[in-house]
Image (cartoon, rainbow, N blue to C red):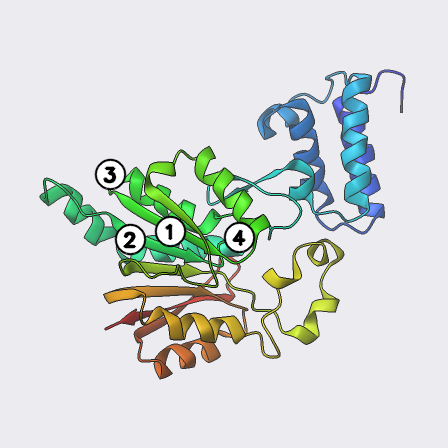
Amino acid sequence: MSDKPTLGSVRWTVKTALLQAGIDTATYDTSIILQSVLGLSQTQLLASSDLSITPHQLNEIWSLARRRCQRQPLAYLIGEVSFADYLFAVGPGVLVPRPDSEVLVESAFQSIRNEAQFQVEHREKSEPIRLLDTCTGCGCIGIAVALKFLEIGCPVELHLADIDRTALQYARQNVMNHHLEPFTQVHEADLFPYPPSKTFQLITANPPYIESGMIDYLMPEVLQEPRMALEGGADGLDLIRRIVNGARTQLNRGGRLFLEHGYQQGPAVSAILSQEGFNAVTTVSDFSGKQRVTSGLYT
């Protein structure tokens, strides 16, 4: 590298280092690292190859690149991640939101969007949509759904529940970052708030669903995330069974439960919902075409 490194030369050397470390997403990761340090958008990054990089900036870039080469999760290094078009604070001790989970947000929102819009348009005062997101982690799913309702003018009462205190610290931070404090309660709870409050119109959950025997085969980055947020028992369905069973006492009549699961678990999750008396059981695929979310109507 020359005495006066440019953005173009630094981008090339960082990407090369990440590729040599076996990181398949080296191009994307390099862009995120550079954007984080330089404060540039993706468009600016692509248009600024001749930009001079200062020694201080170069040190920051290589500090992040070295840690990424050690397979530390990119989101942990940056301290935030984009999910469903919103930014969320994350860090060690909390599950990193993935694009696959965005279909959970969209499915839950669309399930009662028309009903919510009708209330907004035809009633002087709409009742808040009561939403519980359990196994909430950093809160990204529940917060994203709530923000979508607020954007169409529909009031929301959001409840976020998790048993892990570290995860809840991030959830509270993200509630604050998105200015949802007046509408949100955060619960340290084993799946459901206790004592029970009013019932909910929507319950969403991205529980741990990886089979215990598969955990050790995950990518090195994923293994640095909390095991309790990944491991779902021998068949991956332990928490899903508990959520489906408990949701019957937490949902309104006509309320809906949405569950994220592994791409091969759709039929099993559908069977669990049907056995517990849920109707209109439906499975939808994520943006890569893999079955990802199954929902049921409680009647």
Q: Are marks 1 and 2 in contact (CB under 8 Å)?
A: yes
Name the residue type under label 4.
Gly
Residue beneath label 2, please?
Answer: 130
**What is the number of the mark on residue 232?**
none
Q: Percent x, y for residue 128?
A: 23, 47
In the rendered view, does 274 fall on the left or right side of 63?
left
Mark closest to the chain's N terminus, 1 or 4: 4
Q: Percent x, y for residue 224?
A: 72, 54
Name the residue type under label 3.
Gly
**What is the number of the mark on residue 137?**
4
Mark closest to the chain's N terminus, 4 or 3: 4
Circle 2: element type: strand
Residue beneath label 1, please?
Answer: 159
Q: Percent x, y for residue 157?
A: 30, 47
Q: Quadrant of residue 192?
A: bottom left
Q: Are marks 1 and 3 in contact (CB under 8 Å)?
A: no
